[in-house]
Amino acid sequence: MVRFKNRYVLCEVISEDPRCRQCIEDRVLGLAVRDAITRVHGDYGLACCSISFTVKYLNAYTGTVLLRCRKDSYRLLCSALPFVRHLESRGQRYPCSLNTLHVGGQQRPGAGGGRSFNHTGHDAALGTIRTCQKFLIQYNRTQLLRLLQNCTNEEERQCIQKSLLSCSLTEEQSESGDEEDDDGTETD
């Protein structure tokens, strides 16, 4: 059985028009990205990227978007994202742009082959949605810290501090809830 490797691109939709965020749907965004790929790379680029391209996650409130594509064609996708200039929905055109925040699974310069390790020394599972989720949590946390520094009154400060405390990643034992050692025995 063959395993297809994917890359996940985490982006944010930037728009001056607040109505743009209300019109964001994964279908509309996917069509805009496909259109940009066609304009930049032609039919070849569209064919390469369309094989497993999909909008995996979309939060219209924050403008956060997670795109998935094949490992072989993620550079074509990333190079076309700056050419998304508007979203069309219900006969309206809303000017916007996509800012790439993170590419999950991208090999860092200087990292050797095989396994890679993050700054804490733990094994970094590259190429997964989880790496993008972890990055998004850290990104949101830094954004909240910036908001905290710009607070004008105590009520705003307490509200943002509460949001900061709720923005944490807890380690789960495993998917099923039971943790097993390498030899297959359960530990408590």
Image: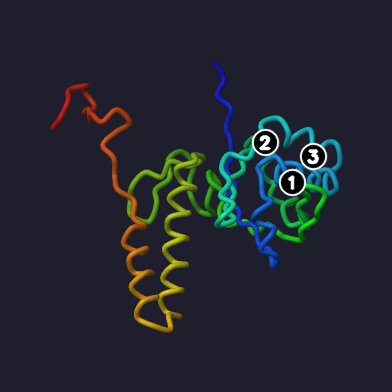
Q: Residue furthest left?
A: 188
Q: Amino acid at mark 1?
A: Val
User: Which is nearer the eye, 164 or 51?
Assistant: 164
Residue 60 in the image, given as x and y percentages of width and height: 59, 52
User: Which is nearer the eye, 172 or 114?
Assistant: 172
**Whole-number angstrom distance, CA of label 3 to CA of label 2:** 12 Å
State the residue at coordinates (29%, 45%): 171
Q: Is residue 70 left or right of residue 104?
A: right
Circle 3/circle 2 CB separation < 8 Å: no
**Residue at mark 1:** 33
Is the residue marked by circle 3 packed among few (<14), some (14-19), or many (20+) residues within 10 Å? some
Name which quarter of the figure residue 95 lies in: bottom right
**Residue at mark 2:** 53
From this view, report whether residue 105 is shown above or below residue 1: below
- At numbered mark 3, what does the secondary structure look like: helix, strand or loop? helix
**Residue at mark 3:** 45
Q: Is residue 178 left or right of residue 145?
A: left
Q: Quadrant of the N terminus?
A: top right
Q: Is residue 22 left or right of residue 35?
A: left
Residue 99 in the image, given as x and y percentages of width and height: 64, 59
Quick one: label 1 or label 2, which is nearer the N terminus? 1
